[in-house]
Image (cartoon, helix red, strand yellow):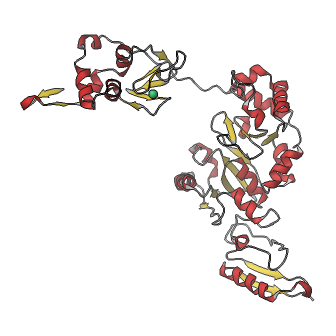
Amino acid sequence: MTTNRGRGARSVDFSEVRERVPLEWFFEAVLGATPKAMSGTIRFPVCPQCGPSSKHSVKVSCKDGKWKCHACPGKGDVVEAAAKHWGLSLKDAALRLVNADQEVMQSYEPPKARPALERDDSALHEVIAKLLAVSQPPTNAALAYFKGRGIGEAIVKEAVKRGLLVVLPHDPELCKKYLVDVAGRDALIASTLWREDAKAPAAAFRPLMFVSKEGKAAEFRIMRLTEPGEHKSLRYGGIHPWAWVNESQDRIMLTEGCLDLLASLAMGTKRSIIGLPGCENWRDDWFAKLKGRDVLTAFDADEAGLAATQKITPVLQKAGASKVDAYELPKDAKDINEQLILQGPHCKLDFFETQESTEPYRDATLSLPGCDQWISLQFGTLKGRHVKLTLGGPKTRNDAALERLVSTLKSGKATVSVANPR
Ligand SMILES: [Zn+2]
């Protein structure tokens, strides 16, 4: 691995050093650290970069010849560990490593990681089932929260009835007591909903529980504005979708999260909806039953959402979807729920269909408070549609405003006719 050249210069083959010097040997023999076998990795209480940690913390994990510190940004291979620890260049560190006693190194037996644990969510499933079994009608606080997001009482109540939503007591103390009464402290701990050293389960502060298909996972969501550093929602269990069977089962919609699923219903869709637990969190086999269906994706208008749309479209096509479209949010809205809030829940349009949809489009009514009281954003979905304007009485007539309304609609590619009542 080292070659002598003229004037004593030596070159180093790093990959050979990595092969001959086991990473775990470096941690045990050089850093004097005691290994701890964990599921899938070996952990050590000493970091080559930030030094030793307290006795109980094993902050560095080693796997497949690489180490990573969970307390500092330090990571790398055995040469990088040695360079950090000795304060040498990579080359000098590699040379020092190969000069270590080869016999000792060859007889070294690295510790073995424990086999990676199979995920066991049975305790969680039991807690979810218990909470579903005693699910209460939505509290006024919850109804007010959803109303503020444009989602009306009927949809919230239906979501509770379907077991998609469980509304827990709003007050954290009462919620904690409720969770303990229903599920028991031990089950809450076993299900990981309650960290043993915490005063209360994190769910006690997040009273909206969105239940995934077949009760396999749950997301607990805060019902107020979050404080800095606070998580808006916490998810427990594996990756599972939310599902809403709707009037149309030939047309399907994919949303990012459960709140957007409910918002889409409030925006009038008749499509059945699959709510993904994050636009990157899905598995191909969820879409196996979409053969021959018309599928609309409606992810957030951010980088992740756009990337996810590109990634999922060929998967849906491969699953045999007859049509795959991506819903285009209006410019000012970054997700479905924001569009709903901006455009107003009073709007009776089905936002997600165009005239080319396979099912005939029904007449829809949009009531404006006055012919000068609207924003162009409200008409973002009228492209290609015929709009019949019905005016109020002569007292409220405002010809200039009417003209602006007509030209705005026309510039949005709608055809317009004006009905003039007596
Ligand atoms: Zn470190």
Q: Residue 328: x percent and y percent? A: 62, 64
Figure quadrant of residue 179: top right
297 vs 219, left or right, is left
Whether 19 is drawn above or below 110: the answer is below
75 vs 363, left or right, is left
Name which residue lies at 66% across and 81% down: 411
Write down which quadrant ligand 1 falls in: top left
Q: Quadrant of the N terminus?
A: top left
Q: Residue 208: x percent and y percent? A: 78, 41
Looking at the picture, tell me which residue is in the foreground, 108 or 148: 148
Q: Residue 406: x percent and y percent? A: 74, 84
Residue 44 visible in the shown view = no
Name which residue lies at 67% across and 27% down: 121
Looking at the picture, tell me which residue is in the foreground, 359 or 275: 275
Name which residue lies at 29% across and 14% down: 105
106 vs 176, left or right, is left
